[in-house]
Amino acid sequence: MKRVLFISLIILLLFSCSKSEGYKKKLDVPYQKMEPQKLEIVEFNKVLFGLDTANFKEEYLAILPRFEAFLIENPSDEEVGYMKEFVTDTFMLKINELVCETFPDINKVSEDIKGVYQHYKYYYPEFNVPPTFTYVSGIYTNRPHTIDEESALIGLDFYLNNKDLVYDMIGFPRYLSRRCQPIYLTRDFADELYYHTYGNMKNQKDVLSEMIEHGKKLYFIEAMNPALPDSVILGYTTQQMEWAQDNEGAVWAAVVGNNMLYTNNVDNRRMLFNDGPFTAPFGDASAPRLGDFIGLQIIRSFMTNNDETLQNMLQMTDRQDLFQRSQYKPRK
């Protein structure tokens, strides 16, 4: 009897390992051969904040040709005046100073972003890598980066580790500002590449479809940088990540047992997908956005159990078929 139990345990462990290795093996692609082999990132923030404010208009107009991909051509005096106010604002000067302290060597950022571009180019070979710049955004948007055919902008002021409580000053809740760390830079850049490729996610007809759409995006982010830890992919603390993994079965049982999966109830959506410090019904030690977490596990299971490319999976519209083929089973 003991021998049978032992053999069963070994089989279970081997099955678990093979499932884990299944999707991970697919993400191990020869990206190093792809372009760009060298990526030059221009530090626009240093150029802009380095202009002589006593002769600002002339110097600003002089740099326009170099940054025409994203600056206004032939700006009015009012627009030039706004830019001067921006670079002389005390808070903006502080932010730029912190950016320079946090990212003293742009070569490290270049290497990290280059890796994301190379992974993307592996899956989407027709993509042309645009001129890439760093900038100080003023933290006025929830999208740190922007990417189009003409340029890619990297907002370094979103990754300052809350030095000098800079994010507290602008009213960021702590559950958001703790993600403002350099390790999140490539994660967010991959997020923007997803937006560039597939556009904004639209609300789905039910919770399961929403889970799958969120899971697709998170899996895409992982594919662009497979070395990212799950906690960063999902935006969790280490403790939240452990909670989600330990309670995956209980969360799934609650979703299924309360008939949430095929509903479009606003309260259910808010509980499973809205951001926050935790998920209230599961207690203040729980992880937030549990719909994202479950969605990622469904997509990982699908990619493990099916011979599909990343692109084919992302373009699948029959979410019920995808779910059934995923053979998803939560950890107990």
Image: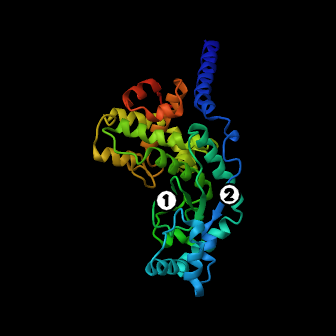
Along the viewing direction, whichever of 44 and 274 lies nearer the viewer: 44
Along the viewing direction, whichever of 288 and 75 lies nearer the viewer: 75
* Separation (CA) of disc 2 from disc 1: 30 Å
Along the viewing direction, whichever of 134 and 51 lies nearer the viewer: 51
Secondary structure state at the residue bearing disc 1? helix
The residue labelled by disc 2 is 40
Q: Which three-letter amino acid code belongs to the residue tagged 1?
A: Leu
Please indicate, yes or no, whether residue 67 appears anywhere in the rendered image. Answer: yes
Q: Identify the image quadrant of the N terminus.
A: top right
Image position, residue 194 (x, y; %) = 49, 46
Residue 127 position by quadrant: top right
Residue shown at the point (51%, 59%) measured from the top left: 144
Label 2 vs label 1, nearer the camera: 2
The residue labelled by disc 1 is 176
Its colouring scheme is rainbow
Image position, residue 325 (x, y; %) = 45, 24
How many dots with numbers?
A: 2
Secondary structure state at the residue bearing disc 2? loop
On screen, residue 272 versus residue 148, left or right, reads left
Q: Earlier in the sequence, mark 2 or mark 1?
A: 2
Q: Which three-letter amino acid code belongs to the residue tagged 2?
A: Glu
Image position, residue 40 (x, y; %) = 68, 57
